[in-house]
Amino acid sequence: MSIQKGDFIKVSYTGKTADDNRVFDTTDEDVAKANNIYNEKGKYGGDVIIVGAGHTIAGVDEDLIGKDAGYTGSVTIPPEKAFGIRNPELIESIPITKFKERPQMGMPVEVDGRPGIVIRVIGRMTQVDFNRFLAGQTVTYDYEIKEKIDDIEGKVKGLLGLYIGKEMPVKVNDNSVTVEIEPELTYNQRWLMTKRQIAREIISNTDIKEILYVEKYNNDVLEPKTAAE
């Protein structure tokens, strides 16, 4: 059966700018290293996503529908379905005194909580572009639908990997799922911000009625080994 909105699939991809073929995102570790965008903390090998849930840009999301597991192809995506239209009003002049260190062209900065990129330095003023990364650019994605995921355990583990990059023990019991949480994860800001979203997406897109997050403690957690041990 072809892929439809709401399906859980595992997909691998490489995103490139259409004008100069520059790789800016990929699930392939070798491609990431070859293009100097490798992240040691990154997750490679493919992502589990829910089609139509906004886990990828709109142009890719739409292109997935109607394809079959195993499909390999490429799609060119205009700005409005990629990273948005570039807004000239989001390019602002900021005094150099606003920055802790002297701005340089291409430097990522944060001004009043807004991330931006320095595009020009003139005298004591700095032009900062607050547009979204790759706004206004046409991009291409080469992708492969590696598999369609039908079992609940695989769906839950897939979303946990997508949102927090970790694999945790999952138990399915009728209409309930229990996820075993490492105690250290309770201090992880990323986890605190996404655990509700993960539960919402599982319940909205499966027959599961509740998600239980359970912290597990044992002697290894309560009494960490010393260096001598």
Image (tube, grey):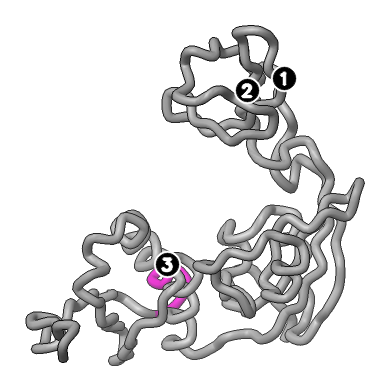
Q: Is residue 108 above or below residue 199?
A: above
Please provide percent x and percent y for residue 47: 59, 73
Q: Nearer the viewer, residue 120 or 91?
A: 120
| Residue located at (66% from left, 19% from top) | 91
Q: Secondary structure at mark 1?
A: helix
Whether residue 64 appears in this view of the structure is no
Residue count near mark 2 (Cα–Cα under 10 Å), binned few <14, some 14–19, many ≥20? many
Kindly identify which residue carries mark 1.
88
Is 89 on the left or on the right of 189, as rendered?
A: right
Residues in magenta, as a range: 202-207
Please provide percent x and percent y for residue 31: 75, 71
Whether residue 55 appears in this view of the structure is yes
Badge 1 or badge 2: first in the primary sequence: 1
Kindly identify which residue carries mark 2.
128
Residue count near mark 1 (Cα–Cα under 10 Å), binned few <14, some 14–19, many ≥20? few
Badge 3 or badge 2: first in the primary sequence: 2
Q: Name the amino acid type tagged 3.
A: Ile
Badge 3 or badge 1: first in the primary sequence: 1
Q: Quadrant of residue 153?
A: bottom left
Q: Which numbered tag is attached to residue 32?
A: none
Please provide percent x and percent y for residue 6: 58, 70
Q: Secondary structure at mark 3?
A: helix
Alpha carbon of mark 3 to alpha carbon of mark 1: how far?
34 Å
Magenta span includes 213: no
